[in-house]
Image (tube, helix red, strand yellow):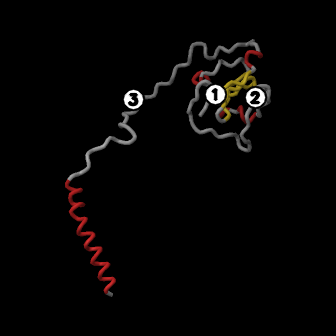
Amino acid sequence: MALVTRISFLLALALAASAPALAQHEEHPAPARPEAHGEPHPGPQGYQRVAEPRGWNTRPATFDRGAYQHNFQAARVYHVGVYRRPAGWVAHRWAFGQILPRAYWAAPYILADYWLFALEVPPVGYEWVRDDGDAILVNVNTGEILQVEYGVFG
């Protein structure tokens, strides 16, 4: 029993010794620090959609296929949201000349506002589509890929 009494006495002594330090801390609050994540931002005052550039939908009826047949690395990366690949498909690195399966050029993947991502005006019969981080210019009748821009989306 003497051991329990000694331990109790030592704990009481430790608490008594730290009480003035705790009281002193409460009497002098810490100085205000700036937020670690920066100042609060007031936020946007409203959403203003970027206007379509003049002639954005004036698609060339005739074009030089050779001028398009490239696989480019994007000059800029855009962060636009989560990408969900079509059900049952796995990641694939596409290239011009390949045939993109129809599931990839369905409505949810078409980039109708392609100019926002610095993509060229697609020729008649072609659309830009997104596959993961890449933008793919595809013939919407055959699925043939005319051009790929790798890494457009981060």
Percent across and percent down for residue 6 are 30, 80
> Mark 2, mark 1: which one is toward the viewer?
2
Label 2 secondary element: loop
**Sooner in the amino-acid sequence: mark 2 or mark 1:** 2
Depth check: 24 or 63 in front? Answer: 24
Task: Identify the image quadrant of the N terminus.
Answer: bottom left
Q: Position of residue 50 (x, y in %)?
A: 51, 22
Instruction: Give the amino acid type for the residue marked by disc 2 in the picture.
Output: Ala
**Residue at which label 2 appears:** 95
Residue that label 1 marks: 111
* Amino acid beneath label 3: Gln
Tell me, yes or no, whether the two marked residues, 2 and 1, touch with CB atoms within 8 Å. no
* Whether residue 141 is visible: no
User: Seen in the image, is 79 located left or right of residue 98?
Assistant: left
CA distance for labels 1 and 3:
27 Å
- Mark 2 and mark 3: Cα distance apart in space: 42 Å
Q: How would you rate the neighbour count of disc 3 (Cα within 10 Å): few for under 14, some for 14-19, many for 20 or more?
A: few
Q: Is residue 94 visible?
A: yes
Q: Left or right? Give the position of 51 relative to 96.
A: left
- Crowding at dot 2, Cα within 10 Å, few <14 / some 14-19 / many 20+, comes out as many
Question: Which secondary structure lies at badge 3?
Answer: loop
Q: Which circle, 2 or 3, is nearer the viewer? A: 2
Where residue 147 appears, x then y in whole percent? 72, 23
Which corner quadrant of the image does residue 41 belong to? top left
Classify mark 1: helix, strand or loop.
Answer: loop
Q: Which label is found at residue 45?
A: 3
| Residue depicted at 76% across the width and 25% down the height | 96
**Label 1 Cα crowd, 10 Å radius (few <14 / some 14-19 / many 20+):** some
Residue at position x 31%, y 86% in the image = 2
Which residue occupies the foreground of this view, 146 or 8?
8
